[in-house]
Image: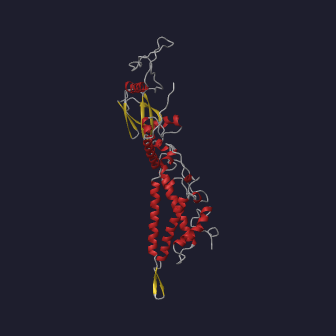
């Protein structure tokens, strides 16, 4: 009898044809399927390659279901990571067998989700903040920022502004202050905690013990003072056109901090957010190697192979519903076999998916937390010996 090893192109996709464990089980699968379908009593109209095709499909189906739930468990940690690809000469999707690895959890997804909020607060984000200046002209209220900022942005960033829609972050008409003097004679007023004084090397210096929030509030107060007390103008931006209120009465320089309007697919934005895993279709999980599957997985594959073979045999017998024999017609059970095979496949898939649903990482963590809580309740009733103190 022809074996799997000496058969040319035994399976349609040849994904597991070089896997030693798959080769061994393929010949046993042939015997298993035909005996379960009654080949010892009535001939089963399935060729070896038909059974082996069902065997390969079962292994691929199992890989697909497992990888789907693995992706569901880890998607938050792998978004933006390198994607899988078809390797040269192989149909095994996935560069380095990531499907057999337990990925380390990361906070990259949360960081990317939080980046826009940091950007709005001026403490982070993915977009560059540009700076430039324009000169106010006496009697002119309207200024075309596309034209005026294209030259001023050259110095800081090496390229002219491309005319994209602007998002103005700040407009200043005084020299930006690099640092504030927090503890000079004008700002050291109304400290909340000034009862703790310490001797210093110079008699006129007094140190105060202050809470951190005091410094933070004072910094905010000084920043607001710079904006309100030193500002004489207001502005509005419409379609990259800046309008100054009131009308300038003398020539003056405005410093402007600005950035491009948000575009999630802008190439100037952090490239890690654009190239990488974006959804289930490009998760770098390949077909699980058959030789790495345990007994639980292999038994599921055997049963699914039998269910596929049953459906396939039913399809073959449905082509000829009856066979004439002397004195009667032999009625074939093609339709019944198709129904039985499909029902068995649905049952196997449902059982596996329900099991995996309870074993995603979030469910495992929740179950472990419940176990720890119950253990703590039990330990409350465990008597502990009282310690003996000697002194």
Q: Is residue 333 above or below residue 258?
A: below
Q: Name the residue nearer the viewer: 301 or 276.
A: 301
Q: Name the residue nearer the viewer: 343 or 221.
A: 343
| Residue 72 pos. (x, y %) | 47, 52
Q: Residue at x 50, y 56 (%)?
A: 66
Residue 73 falls left or right of residue 225? right
| Residue 3 pos. (x, y %) | 62, 70
Q: Residue at x 47, y 55 (%)?
A: 356
Q: Name the residue nearer the viewer: 134 or 98.
A: 98
Q: How is the image coloured?
A: secondary structure
Q: Is residue 311 above or below residue 174?
A: below
Q: Name the residue nearer the viewer: 294 or 376.
A: 376
Residue at the extreme bottom: 327
**Residue 216 in which image quadrant:** top left
**Residue 55 in which image quadrant:** bottom right
| Residue 377 pos. (x, y %) | 42, 42
């Amino acid at each position: 009898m022809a074996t799997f090893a000496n058969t040319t192109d035994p399976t349609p996709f040849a994904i597991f044809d070089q896997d030693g464990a798959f080769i061994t089980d393929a010949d046993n699968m042939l015997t298993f399927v035909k005996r379960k379908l009654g080949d010892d009593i009535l001939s089963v109209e399935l060729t070896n390659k038909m059974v082996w095709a069902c065997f390969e499909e079962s292994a691929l189906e199992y890989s697909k279901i497992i990888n789907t739930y693995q992706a569901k468990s880890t998607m938050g940690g792998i978004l933006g990571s390198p994607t899988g690809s078809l390797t040269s000469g192989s149909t095994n999707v996935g560069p380095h067998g990531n499907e057999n690895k337990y990925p380390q959890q990361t906070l990259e997804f949360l960081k990317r989700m939080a980046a826009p909020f940091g950007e709005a607060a001026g403490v982070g984000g993915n977009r560059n903040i540009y700076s430039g200046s324009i000169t106010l002209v006496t009697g002119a209220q309207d200024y075309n920022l596309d034209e005026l900022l294209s030259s001023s942005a050259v110095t800081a960033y090496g390229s002219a502004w491309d005319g994209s829609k602007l998002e103005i972050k700040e407009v200043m008409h005084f020299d930006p202050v690099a640092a504030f003097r927090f503890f000079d004679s004008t700002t050291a007023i109304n400290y909340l905690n000034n009862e703790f004084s310490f001797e210093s090397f110079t008699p006129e210096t007094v140190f105060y013990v202050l809470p951190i929030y005091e410094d933070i509030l004072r910094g905010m107060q000084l920043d607001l003072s710079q904006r309100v007390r030193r500002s004489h103008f207001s502005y509005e931006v419409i379609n990259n056109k800046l309008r100054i209120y009131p009308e300038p009465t003398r020539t003056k320089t405005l410093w402007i901090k600005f950035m491009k309007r948000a575009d999630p697919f802008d190439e100037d934005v952090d490239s890690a957010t654009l190239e990488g895993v974006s959804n289930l279709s490009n998760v770098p999980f390949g077909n699980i190697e058959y030789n790495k599957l345990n007994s639980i997985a292999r038994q599921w594959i055997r049963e699914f192979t039998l269910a596929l073979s049953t459906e396939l045999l039913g399809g073959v017998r449905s082509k000829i519903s009856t066979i004439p024999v002397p004195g009667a017609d032999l009625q074939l059970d093609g339709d019944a076999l198709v129904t039985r095979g499909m029902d068995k496949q649905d049952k196997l898939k449902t059982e596996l998916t329900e099991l995996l649903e309870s074993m995603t990482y979030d469910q495992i963590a929740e179950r472990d937390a419940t176990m720890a809580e119950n253990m703590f309740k039990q330990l409350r009733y465990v008597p502990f010996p009282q310690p003996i103190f000697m002194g």
